[in-house]
């Protein structure tokens, strides 16, 4: 059994940075304003952090052992909060997250095979 104090601390820091960085953008009301956000946000700088939160923290939660089960729930809540805020503020991150997903690749392959098959009729 382990303790994940450093992971929780990192997630709290990252959540605070995300809150500050996207606070004003999340209060925008028009599509024009969202376009400005999309242009002003360097999405590539977020990718390693989003990947870490998603793959190294969130997806591995069920496989870890915890000294204190409260840490498991705190870690999952922080990871979900971060991903939800980022997806609200930068919708194109959803495309990145899904395109990197093995599930999406499998579904895409199946759909491509179905559509490209000679028996497929529009």
Image (cartoon, rainbow, N blue to C red):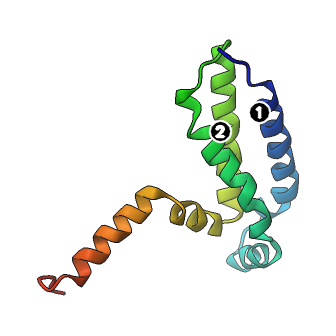
Q: Position of residue 48 (x, y in %)?
A: 73, 57
Q: Which of 107/35 is in front?
A: 107
The answer to which image quadrant residue 66 occupies is top right
Q: Position of residue 49 (x, y in %)?
A: 75, 53
Residue in view at x 37 percent, y 62 percent = 106
Q: Which of 93/51 is in front?
A: 51
Q: Residues within 10 Å of mark 2 (few under 14, many from 20)?
A: some
Q: Which of 63/75 is in front?
A: 63
Is 84 positioned to the left or the right of 111 in the image? right
User: Which residue reaches farthest left?
Assistant: 119
**Number of the label disc, if any, that sits on residue 44:** none
Q: Position of residue 62 (x, y in %)?
A: 53, 29
Residue hosting label 2: 57
Quadrant where the image shows the C terminus: bottom left
Residue hosting label 1: 7
Q: Earlier in the sequence, mark 1 or mark 2?
A: 1
Quadrant where the image shows the N terminus: top right
Using the numbered discs, state the Cα–Cα distance from disc 1 to disc 2 in whole angstroms. 8 Å
Residue in view at x 50 percent, y 58 percent = 101
Q: Which of 73/118 is in front?
A: 118
The answer to which image quadrant residue 16 occupies is top right
63 to 2, vertically: above or below: below
Q: Position of residue 115 (x, y in %)?
A: 25, 80
Element marked by disc 2: helix
Residue in view at x 69 percent, y 48 percent = 52
Element marked by disc 1: helix
Is 97 positioned to the left or the right of 74 in the image? left
């Amino acid at each position: 059994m382990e303790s994940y104090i450093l992971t929780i601390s990192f997630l709290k820091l990252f959540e605070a940075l995300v809150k500050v960085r996207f606070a004003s953008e999340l209060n925008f009301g028009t599509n024009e304003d969202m376009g400005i956000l999309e242009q002003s946000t360097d999405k590539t700088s977020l990718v390693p952090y989003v990947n870490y939160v998603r793959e190294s923290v969130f997806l591995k939660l069920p496989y870890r052992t915890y000294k204190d089960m409260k840490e498991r729930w705190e870690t999952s809540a922080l990871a979900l909060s971060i991903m939800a805020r980022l997806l609200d503020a930068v919708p194109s991150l959803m495309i990145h997250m899904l395109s990197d997903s093995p599930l999406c690749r499998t579904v895409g392959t199946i759909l491509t095979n179905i559509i490209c098959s000679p028996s497929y009729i529009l």
